[in-house]
Image: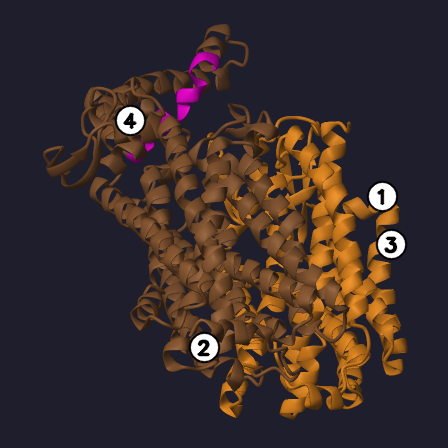
Chain colours: A brown, B orange
Amino acid sequence: MIDPEVVTLSRMQFALTALYHFLFVPLTLGLVWILAIMESVYVMTGREVWKRMVQFWGVLFGINFAMGVATGVTMEFQFGMNWAYYAHYVGDVFGTPLAIEGLMAFFLEGTLVGLFFMGWSRISRVAHLLVTWFLALATSLSALWILIANGWMQNPVGSAFNADTMRMEVTSFAEVMFNPVAQAKFVHTVSAGYVLGSMFVLSISAWYLLRGRNVDFAKRSMTVAASFGLAAALSVVVLGDESGYAVSENQKMKMAAIEAMWETEPAPASFTLFGIPDVENRTTHYALRIPWVMGLIGTRSIDKPIPGIANLVEDTKGRIHDGILAYDAMLVLREDKNNAQAKAILATHDKDMGYALLLKRFMDDPRHATPADIQKAADSTIPNVPVLFWSFRVMVACGFYFIALFAVMFWQASKRQLDKRRWLLKLAFWSLPLPWLAAELGWIVAEYGRQPWAIEGVLPTALGVSSVTTGQVWTSLGGFVLFYSALAIVDAALMLKYARKGPEGLGLWPPVEPEPPVATVAAHAGV
Amino acid sequence: MFDYETLRVIWWALLGTLLIGFAVMDGFDFGIAALLRVLSRTDDERLVLLETIEPTWEGNQVWFVLGGGAAFAAWPQLYAVSFSGMYLAIFVVLLAFIMRPVGFNFRGKIHDARWRNLWDWVLTASGVVVMLVSGVAFGNLFLGVPFQFDDNLRMTWQGGFFDLLHPFALIAGLVSLTMLLTHGACWAAYKADHVVADRAVRVARWTTLAYVVFYVAAGIWLAYGVAGYAIVGPVVTDGVSNPLHKEVAHGSSWFASYMRYPWFWIAPVLGVLGALGVQMSVGKKNLGCFIASTAMVAGTILSAGFALFPFLLPSSLDPRSSLTVWDASSSRGTLGLMLAMTLIFLPLIIIYTSWVYRVLRGRVTLEHVRQSGHTY
């Protein structure tokens, strides 16, 4: 039997390290493109100001990048350390995008990042610009391959179970690569990173303007951040809707949990704007519903129903039954390789094998399951409804708020009035933590929402765990909490220190080269 | 294109290539980190030493990340069994890996002697830990590790952290440590300011000597004191990846494959010749010493890999569960696809890495460090 405490601790450790890693990744993703844009302006206009902007924001990028790399190694190690059966069971499919990420993206990223910092005087302007662009491209490519791997966990296409090797194996790599869930996740996640990077530059620049420091530097930075941020925020929401559609197609239970939709509603379903989900009685109190909206988002039609939680649990019971048949056939085949009947059963029901494995949490041999056990296993497929319900709503609210804020800032920038409204600057400054909140909540919706599955419909999370002791996992979990907390404090202190110092504190501002007066004159013309 | 058997051998070779790539490229960064407080005495000298690796260590470390990813994809069981089995040892290595990027980056961010001292110790420790523990882990492969599979290929491991500290494994750890200290010192001798390089020459002379002693001792111990594993009965080289389909005996010699394929002796000869080359060229402070230490590193890892062939990870608990080249790989399709990807991207990686090293060529001098300040 699997030790439930090891499962819980391993899950806690994975969640902790993933959420922590995801504090740094989105900022890297977004900030690097802002650096690329600024440096392009520098190379095109030849004005030193823009180079100094790249160098200053680059220092903050570097601190953050180091943390991203440090915490990323942990993620890769943990699949083997804490989730060994998972690694065995899906390595043939899941490991491939990770390896390709290394070959195609991470190598490029790791090799160029040093040159980005140390190469200013060693290579030509254009060569340095190319380094920055390739660095930006590589970080986004990195995200692509990681999300192809992650997308397969949500929607395991292009693969089949092999009873001889007891694992999933690739049948079509093209399907794995062009998995619609992976593609939707990729565009949604990277745009969220772009929003986060933009907000970072916007907020810190707003703070300089509030203090009346580096006004010219801050205004230019804000203009770049507002334009890039507006485009990114719009695409996060549009592509997030695409992501929602992909979820409702493939992960019906996650969708129902997000909506706290206990029973199937007649099509088109309404969207619950607000309500208090009640897990005990399987109902939602004080629900404020907008008719039709959910049906439109979830199915892109007005006649397809979205199944509710109760109905999905019933369906799951059927699939567990079929899964047990497949499991039994597999054991028969192990003794008698040529048993035609068992072969036929396995061939029809191998897609339900994972559902039989849900029972492994409660018993060693799924074939001995009673109807009560099957009910229990089916009920265990309901994720934590209130957490998903609220995480999703707060995330979406943040998304719409970002569009509004960036639109206003963009408007202000185009009128060259960024420093005119102090309350707007204050708002921009205090919005700094919101994209992080939204990104972490998005992770919770996507990953906590897929529980109890590690691979949707294929491998239950509890089964994926390693043969390790609670003592071992407590040690590593304690170690991570200790080290990560220490690093978080140091990282925050350094970020703060360098943001406070500002470009002038680093000797980057004002630029040595006298600046042509055009831009500043125009900026003050409307005063 | 290739049959399953050939693909498996190719991926065994690629696993070795990645391991050598990691040891050669990241190895001198570890060596330098560990020698940080030995080779440089003043803050300026430390900056010199760090700048010899600072722009490139990040890319070098990707060899390690890629090695992990490739093992996950091509040898999933090897990845799963070794990482979960040696849980605490891997965790310690992991902590060392976490502290490196932040150590390199954070160290220069505050101009305070105590702050820098702290990070210098962190970097030193991370270098020593990784070199020592990976050697000890490698040594355990020859001893066999206590795991077994059930019918569903779920692995159980019986043994704790301290079981890994067998004297033979400790010697293997010392081989790894002295080998990479030498490699790091050779890089410093080639790349750092002469004050630092002079010290590196003296260090390299002693560490190579120690390396040869430990390496030869480990070889003799392996020949006379460690029993090898061998597949008995028919060997199916293109069968399904299920380790339970074979029989394995414990008690033969790890040198059996050297007897079967005499050209395998190239590897240990290369290791020792490399050490000799280091002794001869280190005083000249040119790239020759680094090339010699590279040969030494490659020869050492190859000699271990050849001795183990076709085993990847023998099991002392249930020899039948041992992972070999023939039964622990991914499916044929995955191996083929990944090979295609490797053939496209590995040459590109080598090209742009070479370009970066060319751009950064030249000795890092004290004068340069004092002038440029420190922006990384």
Question: Are both tags, 1 and 3, on one chain?
Answer: yes
Q: Secondary structure at mark 4?
A: helix
Instruction: Give the residue at mark 3.
Output: B266
Residue A366 visible (yes or no) = yes
Q: Chain of mark 4?
A: A
Q: CA distance from mark 1 to mark 3?
A: 11 Å
Instruction: Give the residue at mark 2.
Output: A499
Name the foreground residue: A219 vs A309.
Answer: A219
Q: Which residue shows up at 35% across the image and 19% down it?
A: A324
Q: Which residue shows up at 71% across the image and 71% down it?
A: A119
Q: CA distance from mark 3 to mark 2?
A: 56 Å
Residue flagged by tag 2: what amino acid is it?
Answer: Ala
Q: CA distance from mark 1 to mark 4?
A: 68 Å
Instruction: Residue B22: give x, y in percent of width and height.
Output: 69, 59
Question: Are both tags, 3 and 2, on one chain?
Answer: no
Instruction: Residue A45: give x, y in percent of width and height.
Output: 67, 67
What are the residue bounds of the magenta stretch? A347-361
Instruction: Give the residue at mark 1.
Output: B261
Q: Residues within 10 Å of mark 1 (few under 14, many from 20)?
A: few
Q: Chain of mark 2?
A: A
